[in-house]
Amino acid sequence: MITAQGLVKRYGAKTAVNNISFDIKPGLVTGFLGPNGAGKSTTMRMIVGLDRPTSGSVTVNGRAYADHAAPLREVGALLDAKAVHTGRSAYNHLLAMGATHGIGKARVNEVIGMTGLDSVAGKRVGGFSLGMGQRLGIAAALLGDPATLILDEPVNGLDPDGVLWVRNLVRSLAAEGRTIFLSSHLMSEMALTADHLIVLGRGSIIADAPIAEILAAASGASVTLRSPQAAELASALAKPGVAITATGIDSLTIAGLTAAEVGETAARAGLVLHELLPGSASLEQAYMQLTENDVEYHTLASADMEAAR
Amino acid sequence: MSATIIAPTRAASGSGLSLGRIIHSEWIKLRSLRSTIWSYAIVVLVSLGMSFVLASALSNQDFGPLVDSPEHTLIQASTFGTTFGVLVVAVLGVLVISGEYSTGMARSTFTAVPKRLPALAAKAIVLFVTTFVVGLIATLASAGVALLVLTSNGVEPAITGEFVSSVLLACLYLSLVSVFALAFGTILRSSAGGIAAALGVLLLLPTILMVFASVTQAQWAIDLIPFMLTTAGESMILPAEGGLEIWQSTLTVALWSLIPLAGGALLLKGRDA
């Protein structure tokens, strides 16, 4: 359980995190989303005491991280895959990290095996690929067999095999009752992994809800139907706030109505339906809608780029 | 939350942080970097070489009789390498912490030891002890070289109590300089900046002060010279006539390393890692 209350972090005049409060519950994978610069990494760094909050507090299992007698056994954190001395071997890095908590060679070899680093454990980290560095970071997070895991962009740079491995690992750790707090920019991956989402934009929480609720609330949910009387149905369904697109001779896509409403309207008008398919918005669509006003670093949309030419 | 979810309970007693464990961790870190091995190897080898050259030069009968007593000649030759050794351990001392900042390792270190000060203390202790032991190996081996050269040139020094204390004080000087440099690395968090500052204090500051003193003849500047890190350090080993007492020089060097270390600790505790 991670609990933040009124957490604020300012760097000079810039407010990175603006008065956020949340609970991250055990047994669930909580995804942490937000545009670049939204304050995700700063929040994660504050949880493990690397950054001092300007005000507010954050606790892990009821206590500030630094006040735990065995912090690495409480929380495993992957905050930055490059938090390793490049001149040291992966094995010695893990051995030194573990030594602070009396964690010995046996556990070090175990996490090396779990993360598939056996063949490179003796090599210096400076020569590691992004994916190897990421695996080493995850190995370090797992060292203390912690009840809480904080993973900032764990799949960044991993091959498809590694991405799948992280997803299964995270799901199984959550199933064991651990608290998992995970950030990623890969929406499709997040949709498969997370149970609950916290979305941050410009340092504030935009959404904090189960993933199903966030998807349901997003517009872009649509209903697809097939009917030999598509044209008649279209005029029966037409009203303000409803967008109807003909996607074929006998098929329509309707946004702004639920499948039930479409079916009832068809029945009342005595029109025949061959198919009626509710489709939910993708997490990517939901996320884009939530954060469209909170993106710190805008890229030119393609239309703007056309105009700029 | 469903009832089937059981939060794992762990952190059995005795499984947490302790200063002894953090020291062990810092020892693994120090010994597992090539820069450490190279630095200490250079300290030993250069000390051996400098001892050989000085012992040969001082005892060469072609240059006339010994300037100093055989015993003092032995001390001079055995500890001559310290003047160069302090520069090497200063670089190493800075790198022990600045290398963590430049690579990002500091974030791992302070995640494992979130109170931070025990990690700095452990670094200082490990660096101090290791440097002392390496210094002891270097000076004793250099004494062996010096003895061989001196006796072959017909000079036969006795091993005195002063020899023993000079060797130990030379090692103490070397160790205190490494901690002094660690403090500068902690404060500046940069390898280049830390090394420049540490070497500046060791080499440049006394030179500037001496030039200033000889040009202006200002008494306060002349009085300050013995309190420079290098002048105090060298008079720990062989006190100058009419200069500071050994304990005064030792205290001066100790303050040069402990005051910056306290400053570094204060900064480390307060700022974002």
Image: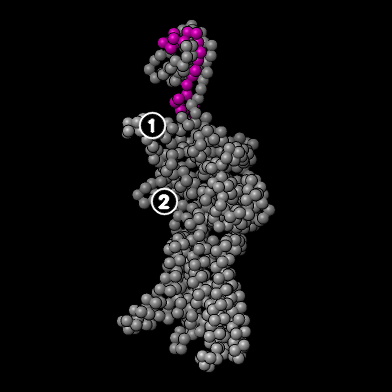
Residue at left offset 46%, top offset 89%: B241
Q: Judge whether residue A98 can be spotted in this image.
A: no
Judge whether B97 appears above or below A173 on screen.
below
Where is the N terminus of chain A found, in terms of image quarters? top right
Q: Amino acid at mark 2?
A: Thr
Q: Judge whether residue A270 can be spotted in this image.
A: yes
Stretch of the chain drawn in magenta: A215-235
Q: Which residue is mark 2?
A: A54
Residue at left offset 38%, top offset 82%: B223
Judge whether A277 appears above or below A211 on screen.
above
Residue at left offset 40%, top offset 73%: B204
At which x and y percent is residue A86? Answer: 54, 55
At which x and y percent is residue B135? Answer: 57, 74
Foreground pick, B246 / A298: A298
At which x and y percent is residue A117? Answer: 63, 48
Judge whether B64 appears above or below A106 on screen.
below
**Cα–Cα gap, marks 1 and 2:** 39 Å
Q: Which residue is mark 1?
A: A302
Quarter of the figure with residue B151: bottom right
Residue sitting at the far top: A270
At which x and y percent is residue B261? Answer: 47, 67
SS for dot 1: helix
Would residue B94 be counted in the magenta stretch?
Answer: no
> Mark 1 or mark 2, which is nearer to you?
1
Q: Amino acid at mark 1?
A: Ser
Foreground pick, B52 / B273: B52
Where is the C terminus of chain A found, in terms of image quarters? top left
For residue A84, side relative to residue B243 (left or right): right
Quarter of the figure with residue A161: top right
Residue sitting at the far right: A106
SS for dot 2: loop
